[in-house]
Image (cartoon, rainbow, N blue to C red):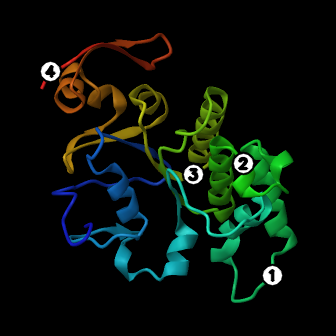
């Protein structure tokens, strides 16, 4: 709920361990609200559980060890270096006033290398471009080492190279057992990378399942207001050919 007003209605779904779930829907459909609810940031009615325990019953630090959330944009109140910002992702694993260890520093370097910003480690985050800053927050989520990674349009500020590099990295994490729920703006990228899709429309679940089953011309017409043709390529990926928008 936002300001006491329900935004999502009658949702019923499960997320299996080790899968990548893509969230799709037009603007205002509730995708970001759903991610914020899954992260424990928003109140909810009904049943929402992690490992069989109600989400609202989890203590904040314990939940942070299980769930990492990368937002579309995050305001910064302090002038952190990239190293300092990324190391904050280790906070759920630290006790009060506990200092960073060699293991923390190793995780830091590995994360910076994986998102291709190691040369920027000593720079002020405020001096970074939008894409560089987004990769810093992605690195912060990686060092958190949570089982569930929530991504709100993580490639929004990235150039094409870093979009695919990051999505390939996420795929590697999923193959290694991580669970990912990611909002996609690009339907074709969602079809290419996600194992399952949840399609929201006006706060309700319009469709759920594998991309090839969910993404149909009828669904794209009713939810996204576009006439399309779909083609399955030789490698099994789904190609979407947009034709014309549907008038209101």
Q: Determine the secondary structure under disc 1.
A: loop
- Front tag of 1 and 4: 4
Residue 105 spot, x, y in % from top left: 83, 65
Q: Which residue is mark 1?
A: 99
Q: Earlier in the sequence, mark 1 or mark 4?
A: 1
The residue identified by callout 3 is 177
**Disc with the residue nearer the chain's start (3 vs 1):** 1
Secondary structure at numbered mark 4: loop
* Residue at 19% over, 24% down: 221
Q: Quadrant of the N terminus?
A: bottom left
Instruction: Indicate the position of residue 162 as horizontal and vertical percent values.
Output: 66, 34
Q: What residue appears at the point 35 percent right and 30 percent down from the top-left corner?
A: 211
Measured Cα–Cα span from mark 4 to mark 2: 41 Å
Q: Is residue 54 visible?
A: no
Write down the residue under mark 4. Answer: 247
Query: Is disc 1 in contact with disc 2, using a CB cutoff of under 8 Å?
Result: no
Question: Between tags 2 and 3, which lies in front?
Answer: 2
Residue bearing the label numbered 2: 128
Query: Label 1 vs label 4: CA separation?
Result: 59 Å
Q: Pick whichever, 1 or 232, lies toward us.
A: 1
Picture disc at residue 147: none
Gap between marks 3 and 1 measured at Cα: 29 Å
Residue 32 locus on image (x, y percent): 37, 53
Mark 1 vs mark 2, CA separation in Å: 27 Å
Residue 106 visible: yes
Q: CA distance from mark 4 to mark 3?
A: 43 Å
Q: Quadrant of residue 232?
A: top left
């Amino acid at each position: 709920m936002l300001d006491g007003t329900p935004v999502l209605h009658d949702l019923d779904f499960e997320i299996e361990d080790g899968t990548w779930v893509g969230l799709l829907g037009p603007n205002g459909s509730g995708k970001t609200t759903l991610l914020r609810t899954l992260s424990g940031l928003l109140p909810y009615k009904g049943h929402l559980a992690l490992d069989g325990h109600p989400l609202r019953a989890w203590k904040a630090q314990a939940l942070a060890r299980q769930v990492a959330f990368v937002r579309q944009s995050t305001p910064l109140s302090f002038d952190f270096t990239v190293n300092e910002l990324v190391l904050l992702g280790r906070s759920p694993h630290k006790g009060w006033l506990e200092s960073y260890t060699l293991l923390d520093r190793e995780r830091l370097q590995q994360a910076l290398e994986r998102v291709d910003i190691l040369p920027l480690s000593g720079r002020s985050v405020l001096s970074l471009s939008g894409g560089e800053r987004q990769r810093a927050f992605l690195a912060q989520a990686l060092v958190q080492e949570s089982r569930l990674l929530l991504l709100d349009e993580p490639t929004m500020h990235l150039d094409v190279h870093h979009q695919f590099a990051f999505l390939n990295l996420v795929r590697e994490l999923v193959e290694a057992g991580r669970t990912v729920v990611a909002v996609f703006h690009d339907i074709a990228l969602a079809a290419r990378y996600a194992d399952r899709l949840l399609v929201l429309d006006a706060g309700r679940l319009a469709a759920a399942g594998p991309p090839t089953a969910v993404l149909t011309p009828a669904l794209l017409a009713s939810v996204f207001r576009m006439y399309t043709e779909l083609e399955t390529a030789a490698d099994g990926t789904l190609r979407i050919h947009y034709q014309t928008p549907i008038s209101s």
